[in-house]
Structure formats: structure tokens, C-alpha cells
Image: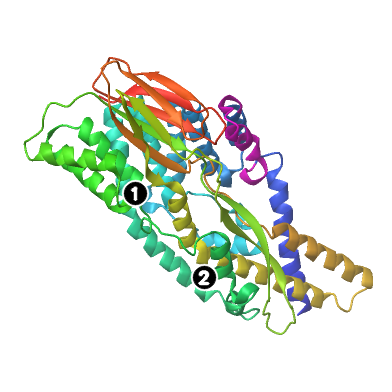
Amino acid sequence: MGRVGFERMRTAVGVVALMFGTIGCQKNWHQHSHEFLEPYANGNFTAAVKAVQDVTKNGVAHDKTILTLEEATILRAAGKVQESDNAFANADVLIGDYEQWPTVRLTEEAAVALTTVRNVNYRGYMSDIVMLNCFRALNAMELGQHDKARAMLFRAGFAQKDIAAKYQAQLAKAEADLDAKKKSKDYDANQTLTAKGDGGLNVTERIERDSGLTALAPYSDYLGPFADYLQGVYFLNVGSGTSDLNFARTGLRRALGMLGENDYISQDLAEADRSLQGGGEARPALTYVFFETGQAPFREQVQIALPLFLIGNQVPSVVIAFPILQEQGNYVRGLAVRAGGGTFQTEVVCDVDRVVKQEFKNNLSQTITRMVIAAVTKAAIDAAAQQAVKNQDASIQLITALAMFAYQATMNQADLRTWRTLPKQFQVARVPTPSDRALTLQLADGSGSIPIVIPDDGSVHVVYVKSVRSGIAPTVRVFRLK
């Protein structure tokens, strides 16, 4: 028993030393994301670009994907559309082949148990892959690269519909793999997971409550309407022939089915139906106002005391760090567009909070089980180490106890990585372009009006408005779609 305890302690100390020795002066998302998130939240996109590029350039390997996604969206917010697309392309390469896209590899599970989940490679969530391709499609539209926009929309659809089933199967397999690890000769994690605590709730129920998941109304397991809506708008306005019109109608129907109602999508869908029935008329000039508002939920670390059940040892409880989701409420609720004597109020086409929350919920069981197994593994190492030195000098016992305490405290960290620069919502207004081509934008926070003149260089235009939070001036860009 003494030798086993010594070997476990030496392994744990070695892992910690290796981790800190290899990170060196590299930057990571958890410690350094504030360097770009703070200027981003204040609308200082120039400073945010400089900061995120520095952090990404010097970032640790396991954070490269999430840092590159943040870099791409901040570049896009700054109006650097081509650079944004280049960064999204880099993130796409880091995520890898969608057909082979993994969740957590089995080779990393042992490292999680001994170190921290923050060292697991971030490969992106399902929603990350869909949104990456949506943004690349928007970038291509703005750059006038219509073949590329088409390709990105097909990729977003493929991710959303085809690999979602594969992802579900992988989650089920990962659940089964973790179930097999819930009990070993050293511990019984299942008793910890089912133990009732605050308010008669187990740990999963408590995190669901604190993350606002108990009343969640998802679009579906892995779907959000934005990719389908973009497909509908693009193929309706830029496509040619019956095949593209069918793509448009399919996307608009799916988006409307998830949203329940949206007058602007209904108008586009009616137009697609008329065109497919051979009744298409000459279309008046049209302007779509896309409104990207707010910031997506962030993860916050909470510490929950749970009982541990170690075989042959009495360990009453341990405090374990878990992530919870927190919404960001300071955002502009809507946008009114005045044009041609009429007023058009934006409507939601995708509530990103709902998408992120549903995926968080889908992965929650794995997240919690992984953290509990890691905690009981470390506690077992601690117990074995204490047993190994119980007959040693008091100073040796003290050093061992301090080393094990430092080891567990350092490794007890929740994974808070999530794509923070995503918006809270996407909204849209569909506006007939007036003869004077003049629009006025009025934000719901009362921060003033923004006059816009639509160029006379096409029949369909997009006004893209981005607001990070209430009280911060939005950015506005106009580009021709057709």
C-alpha cells in the first residue's frame, strides 16, 4: 500500500510540474481572454483586434481553436471582413474534418482525471461549427464572393443536419464510457452524483437551475434557425432556377417552423412559393436589415460541496468546481427602420442564448461526471499518499499533506471556455427600398437615430448593424447582395 501511495503521489506531482513547466510564457483563454473581451464589450474593436491577435499568436495549443474563433468575430466586428474570413478558415482547419470531428478523445480522459479539464483541447461545439460557416457565408456575401457563400451555406446545413446525428451517437457512447468509470476499486462516483444537497436537488439539478435550463424551450437538440434563414434569403435573392428556389423555400420553412412566427420570413416564403408556381413578378428593390445584438452567455465557475465515497477511506466531502451559464442582459432589445413613410421593427431570427443553453444542457451530464470522477481520483491519490507516510516523521506528513492540498486546489478548475464574442440574438427587418433610398435606424435604447443611404448599384442590399451592448454606438455596414 505504501508503494502504491508513493507512486500515485509521484505521478500527480509529475503531472503538475510538467503542466506548469510546458506552459511557460504562453497565453491561455482562461487567464487572458479579458484582454480582448473588455475592449470588445466597450465597442473598441481596434484595441480588441490588437489584443486578441496577440493572445492567439502566443496561445497554448489546446486553446488555439477558441482563440481563433474569437479573433475571427472581432475582426468581423471591426470591419476587417477578409481578415475575418482568413481567421475563420484557420479555425475550420483546427476543428478538422467534420466527418471525423470528435468530442473528447479517450486518451484525454486520463489527463482530465489527473490534471484539469482546462487542458483538454477545445475542438468546438456543434453550434460553433454551424455559426462559423454562417459567418463565413456572410463574409462571402459582403465580399461579393457568391460561389463561396453558396458553399458555406451548404456546409452549415451539412453540419446542422447530417453530423448532428453522429454527434448524438458520440455523446451516447461517451456517456456509456463514463458510466463504466463511475465505480472503481477506489471510489463510487455514482453515489456522489445522486447525493441530494441544496433544496433536495442533486448536483445536475442544481446546475440546471442556476443556469436557467429548467424552463428552456429549445429550437431542437442541435438546430438553430439562423443557418436555414440565411440559406433562404441567399437562394431566394441570388440563386437561379427551380433548384435554388427549392433550397430557399426549404430553408425558410425550416426557420419559420423553429421560430413559430416571423412576418419577414413569411413574406420571403410566400415569394418563393409564388416563384415556384410560375407567378413571380418583377421584384421591387429590397433591403434586409440584419441586427446582431448583445453578447452570448458566458460560463461562470461555482463551487459545490459534495460527499465523496472512497472505498475503505472516510472522506466526508470535497468542494468541486463546476461551470454554470449566465446570460448577459445589457443589450439593445430591437431596432426600428423608418423608410418611405413606414416603420419596420426588427424581429428575432435566432436567439443564440437558446442555442448555447441547449448544447450546454446536452453536454451537462458528461461535464459533471467528468468533474466528479476527477475529484474522487485526486482524493484517492491524496488518501493513498497520506496512508503511505502515516508512519513517517511528522514533517514528512505535513509536506505530503500540503503538496496534496496544493495539487487538488490547483487542479480543481471548471472549463469556462465558450465562444464569448457571439451575439445574444440575430434580428432582421425586410424593407422595400424607398425611391429616395434613405433609411433611418432607431435603436430601442433611445441612443439616437442613424441615417443610411442605400447605394444605387443593385436591387437587393443588406444593412448589417452590430450592437455589443446598450449605450455603446453600433457599427453599420451596407453591401449589395444582388
Residue range highlighted in magenta: 28-47
Q: Quadrant of the N terminus?
A: bottom right
Q: Residue 135 at x, y = what percent?
A: 40, 36
Q: Is residue 149 left or right of residue 51?
A: left
Q: Please name the amino acid that badge 2 sits on.
A: Leu
Of the 4 image quadrants, the one containing the C terminus is: top left
Residue 269 screen position, x and y as percent: 20, 42
- Dot 2, how many residues are within 10 Å of its Cα: few (below 14), some (14-19), or many (20+)? some
x, y (%) of residue 44? 59, 27
Q: Which residue is mark 1?
A: 159
Asked whether, in this view, residue 105 is left or right of residue 268, the answer is right
480, above or below 175, in the image: above
Horizontally, is 400 left or right of 451 in the view?
Answer: right
> Which one is closest to the eye, mark 1 or mark 2?
1
The numbered disc on residue 178 is 2
Task: Please report whichever mark, 1 or 2, sits nearer to the chain's N-terminal start.
Answer: 1
SS for dot 1:
helix
Residue that lies at the very extreme toward the left in this rendered image: 278
Residue 153 occupies quadrant: top left
Q: Residue furthest front?
A: 341
Q: Residue at x 44, y 57 (%)?
A: 358
Q: Hey, which quadrant is residue 398 in on the image? A: bottom right
Depth check: give the residue in front, 203 or 453: 453
Q: Secondary structure at mark 2?
A: helix
State whether residue 351 appears in this view.
yes
